[in-house]
Each structure stands twice: as C-alpha cells, then as structure tokens.
Amino acid sequence: MKTLKFNPFFYILTSLLVAVDFLALIISFEVLSYTQTAALDITPYFWIFIFILLTFAAQEIYIVRYDFWGDAKRVLKGVFFSFFAVFTIISLAKVFDDYSVDFLLKFFITAMFVTLFFKRFFKKLFFTFDVFRLKVKIVADEQNYETIAKEIEKNWYFGYEADDTEYDLIIISSRGFELSKLQESIREFSRTTKDIFIIPYLDYLDFSHATIVDFSNIRFSAIHIENRLLNLKNIFIKYFFEKITILMLLPFALVLHLFISRLIKRDSIGAVFFKQKRLAKDSKLFECYKYRTMYENSQEMLKEYLLKNPDEVEYYKKFHKYKNDPRITKIGRFLRRTSLDELPQFYNILKGDMNLIGPRPYLPEELHAMGEDNKDIILRVKPGLTGLWQVSGRNKLTFKKRVDLDVWYIQNWSLWMDFVIFLKTTKVVLLKVGAK
C-alpha cells in the first residue's frame, strides 16, 4: 500500500496549533492588562507574540508530535529564550519607555502556563476528530507490540491510533529482530512510508540526550552516551537546585509534620518516627527515617497472618511488599498511599545521606537481589526521597522493574527529568495513586 501521499489535514492541524498558541498569548496579555491601573495597547506587543511563536516553531513543536512533557520542555525553553531576547532587543533599541518591564515579566510567566493549558485542552479536542489522528503501524515482537500499543492507546496527547493496514507512519522496535531482518524491513517500508520511527535495541538508554558524531568518510555514526549522574557537573547542578527546593519546601514540611504527628499519636500507641538501616552511596548504611505506620506488636501480627495466608509469602518474593499487610495502622495506610510516610527523610537530606530525587533507598537484605551490575550503578549515587519508581506505578511493579527504573534514571538523568518527577510526585500525594 502507498502511504506517500499529500495530507492536507497535517497543514490544517499545524495552522490550528499555531492559532491556539497565538490565542493563548493574547489571552495572557488581556488578563494581565486588567490588573494594570492604565489600559495597555496590545499593538506594540504583537512583535513579541510573533517572536515567541517563532521560537516554538524553531523547536519543531508544530510539526513533530511530542508527548505533553516533551511539549512542556520546549515551551519552557521557548519562553525563557524569548524573555531574554526581547529584553535585549528593547534595551538595544532604547525603547524601555514604551514597555513596562514588570508587566513583561508577568506576561512571560503567565503565557507559559496558559500556553501549556491551551495545548493540552485543544489537542484533546482536535484529536477527537479522526482526520487529525495519525494511523500507526507497529512492527515488533509480541511483548514490545503490546507495550507500544498500550502507550498509543493511553497517551492521547500524541494523537496516534494503531492500525496495521492503513497507516501514516511506522514504529519499529529493534528487539526480537535479527540485524539482517531489521535492515530488510526498514528498506522495504521506506519505499512507501515517509516517516519511520525506530526504537533502538538498547532501549535502556535515552538517546534524546546522546550526541551523534558522524564519521562521514566511512559513512558511520557514533552515539556518545554516559552515566549522567556520575558526571561532576551534573552532580553539582543537581545538588544546587535540590538544596534551593528543599529550603523552599521546609516551612511547609514543618507545618505538615506537626499535623501528621498529631494524627499518628491519636491513631495508635507508639512513637511518631520509625528508623531503619538502609543502603546509601558506596554501599554504606544509614538510618533512614519514616513516620511509624505499623502497630507496636507488628511482628506477632504478621506471623499469625502469614500462617493463614501462605500465598502472601510468594507475593512478597516478587514485589517485596504484602498485598494486605495487617501490621499497618489506619493513618499508616493513608500515609503510605500518599507517600507522606517518607516526609521525615527531609532530615536525611539535610544531613547529606539522601537526595530529594533519586533511587529509593534499598534494604541491606535486598543487596543480593539487585544483581552485581545493577548494584554497581545504583549504589554510586545517593538515594532519593522520591524517584522514578515512586511515580511509575510503585507497588504494582515487580522488584526487578524497580531496579531497572533506577538504573535507567541514573544513566539518563537530566534536570528536566527531576522536575517532571517532582511534579508527578505532587500528583501521587494529592490523588493517592502511583502515577505513570
């Protein structure tokens, strides 16, 4: 079948997305203008709107379909760059009298949030129409086919729809294919299909951060990869931004601590805090603090429960948790569902034992189960109060999957990833679920 065809709806959707962003900028301006003592004329600001749209377009935000966080990253970069560029232009042109610096600062901040809200709202609306959705053929083995198909179904922001007969683009997963078969498939599909996405065999690496170097004389390309959290520059950046975040959150955390402590005391007899030996950087042990979420006679309760429910033993071997743990108090269940039981680890962060974001601290008895290769990677960095495992399903994931996520996080770290994990952690706390 031929898929090299003109699609007018691609250009219609592109125009609509540009119009939506332009509308978001106008609304941001108008909303802020109501807060001013004197009415502002929008006309002198139109060139700023156009400049912002051009920075978005330069990042291919209108022609490449990213997920929401991919779009958010590019919107943030576009607004940030535009902010400094506009102020530079105004300064060099010496037209400060024509613009309110305070208003412009508020406008750029407001525009960032309004633009993202509009993108999410209107993309949801546009993709309800089949003409704007792209049909995707998935070429993969059974396991990867199911994973990709499920992501296409759940992540509506892409505007994709799985279809193996009539399709606009192809996603090929390298895993499960011999090299010769993979090359043959790519050659065959490239004759009739313009857009082909290839998921590399090394799917534990995030190639969006990799540098590609061309050896043009021999027609080879080399991909430079690194364990990003072992880079001294990245360690300093992470340390700097986390310390600022912790200092900002500390007053709120102290107020919350007083409230939670009161609830724990009223719920059951015992101490407010629970401390446990956990593995830190370089396999060292440290005292990890949590709120007490179990009854004082928890071990006796567990022994009796396991005698009546032997299937829980197998469940623990797989997930390192029990399905229905009888030791947990009423307030403890709430604290665990929302991850608020981890709040005392702010003290561990201030002591320097932990980071705000990183692999969750492992128990000493879990050291062997991590595997030699994984252990060498995970225990090279500090554990975190929250991390990728916390926002990717948590208790629904196997222990092996948790280890895989921690390794992936360390090898592919970025400040943006930490920012996304932080926002998703807020969702976990508020909605009491393991986010995706």
Image (spheres, helix red, strand yellow):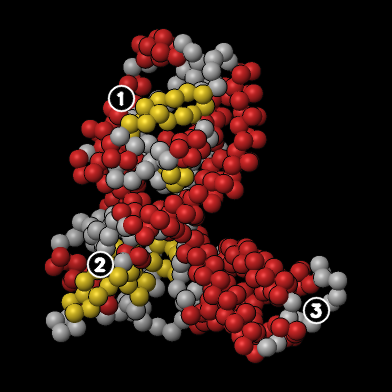
- Tag 1 near tag 3, CB within 8 Å: no
Q: Eyeballing the image, is 340 above or below 59?
A: above
Residue at mark 2: 224
Q: Eyeballing the image, is 4 above or below 368?
A: below
Which of the two labelled residues, at mark 2 and mark 1, occupies the earlier sequence position?
2
The structure residue drawn at horizontal position 39% and vertical position 73%, both measured from the top left corner, is: 168
Secondary-structure class at tag 1: helix
Real-space Cα separation, disc 2 to disc 3, in angstroms? 50 Å
Q: Amino acid at mark 3?
A: Leu
Which of the two labelled residues, at mark 1 and mark 3, occupies the earlier sequence position?
3
Which of the two labelled residues, at mark 2 and mark 3, occupies the earlier sequence position?
3
The structure residue drawn at horizontal position 60% and vertical position 38%, both measured from the top left corner, is: 253
Give x and y (percent) for residue 192: 30, 79
Q: Which mark is residue 40?
A: 3
Q: Is residue 326 left or right of residue 32?
A: left
Q: Is residue 117 left or right of residue 159?
A: right
Secondary-structure class at tag 3: loop
The structure residue drawn at horizontal position 44% and vertical position 52%, both measured from the top left corner, is: 239
Q: Nearer the viewer, residue 371 or 184?
A: 371
Give x and y (percent) for residue 201: 23, 60
Residue at mark 1: 314
Real-space Cα separation, disc 1 to disc 3, in angstroms? 68 Å
Real-space Cα separation, disc 2 to disc 1, in angstroms? 42 Å
Mark 3 crowdedness (10 Å alpha carbons): few <14, some 14-19, many ≥20: some
Q: Amino acid at mark 1?
A: Glu
Give x and y (percent) for residue 320: 35, 29
Q: Amino acid at mark 2?
A: His
The image quarter containing residue 31 is bottom right
The image quarter containing residue 18 is bottom right
